[in-house]
Image: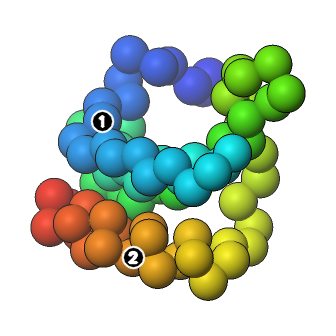
Amino acid sequence: MPYEPAKDVSVFKEIIELGDTRVTVGVFSYNEGAKKLQLSRENQTAEGEWRFAKLGRMTKDETEAVLPLMQKAVGQM
């Protein structure tokens, strides 16, 4: 069964910008299922556009900035 964007509901979403990188913390529920936490990273290109990037590892600064948002997100789950 293919992914249907209309069934993906955002319950919580906040973005933290750290220079040319931004991390989004969100809580989503797909097809009225369990609420799940999602983290994503975007890097800014030389042209000023934001592009999705893998969020496999985070720096200490990123982690310290994102942790309070994650705690806030858990309250929405």
Quadrant assignment, res 12: top left
Tag 1 residue: 10
The answer to whether 51 is drawn above or below residue 61 in the figure is above
How far across and how far down the image is residue 28, in percent?
35, 44
- Classify mark 1: helix, strand or loop: strand
Distance in Å between CA atoms under marks 2 and 1: 19 Å
Identified at 34% across, 69% down, the residue is: 70
Tag 2 residue: 67
Q: Which mark is residue 35?
A: none
Identified at 30% across, 31% down, the residue is: 9
Q: Residue furthest right?
A: 46
Q: Which of the two labelled residues, at mark 2 and mark 1, occupies the earlier sequence position?
A: 1
The count of marks equals: 2
Q: In this rendered view, identify the residue nearer to me: 9 or 20.
A: 20
How far across and how far down the image is residue 52, in percent?
72, 37
Residue type at the position of mark 2: Leu
How far across and how far down the image is residue 43, in percent?
73, 42
